[in-house]
Amino acid sequence: MTIERKPASVKNAEHYLWGDGCDGWHLLNRDDVSVIQERMPLGTSEQMHYHKIARQFFFVLDGRATMEDLSFLVFSVPKSHKDRYER
């Protein structure tokens, strides 16, 4: 039996809003790993924070490293939900 799966993309992934006008799409959402594509429009920001357990890798897809009008991927192992601590 073959299971056909569509490639994950923002067109078919679960979408959520975060921060002050930012978007996120769960491309992969498992307990052991997550991959999220996020978009931060110009003028938005995120609180400084850290994770005690999850290790994260950010891959910038579009925009500038100074976080202006940015689109990026976040890989977390294990997923970082409920593992967020404000600085």
Image: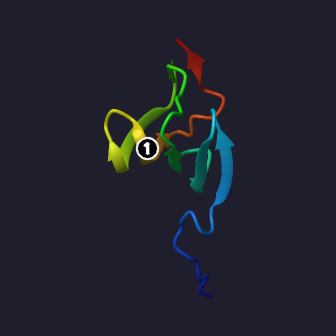
Furthest-left residue in view? 65
Q: Amino acid at mark 1?
A: Asp
Residue nearer the viewer, 31 or 9: 9
Residue 81 position in % (x across, y down): 63, 34
> What residue is shown at x 48% (from left), y 39% (from top)?
42
> What residue is shown at x 39% (from left), y 41% (from top)?
58
> What residue is shown at x 50% (from left), y 34% (from top)?
43
At label 1, counting other C-alpha atoms closer than 10 Å, the crowd grade (few under 14, some 14-19, many 20 or more) is: some
Residue 72 position in % (x across, y down): 43, 48
Furthest-front residue in view? 43
Q: Circle 1 sits on which residue?
A: 69
The count of marks equals 1
How is colour applied across the structure in the image?
rainbow
> What residue is shown at x 59% (from left), y 83% (from top)?
4
Q: Height in image: 83 above or below 72?
A: above
Q: Height in image: 3 above or below 86?
A: below
Q: Is residue 77 visible?
A: yes
Residue 84 position in % (x across, y down): 59, 24
Residue nearer the viewer, 35 or 19: 19
Furthest-bottom residue in view? 1
Where residue 75 sits, quadrant-wise, is top left
Task: Locate residue 13 relative to residue 52 in the image: left or right.
Answer: right
Task: Locate residue 68 relative to residue 43 in the image: left or right.
Answer: left
Q: Is residue 29 visible?
A: no
Residue 47 position in % (x across, y down): 55, 22
Residue nearer the viewer, 61 or 44: 44
Q: Height in image: 33 above or below 66?
A: below
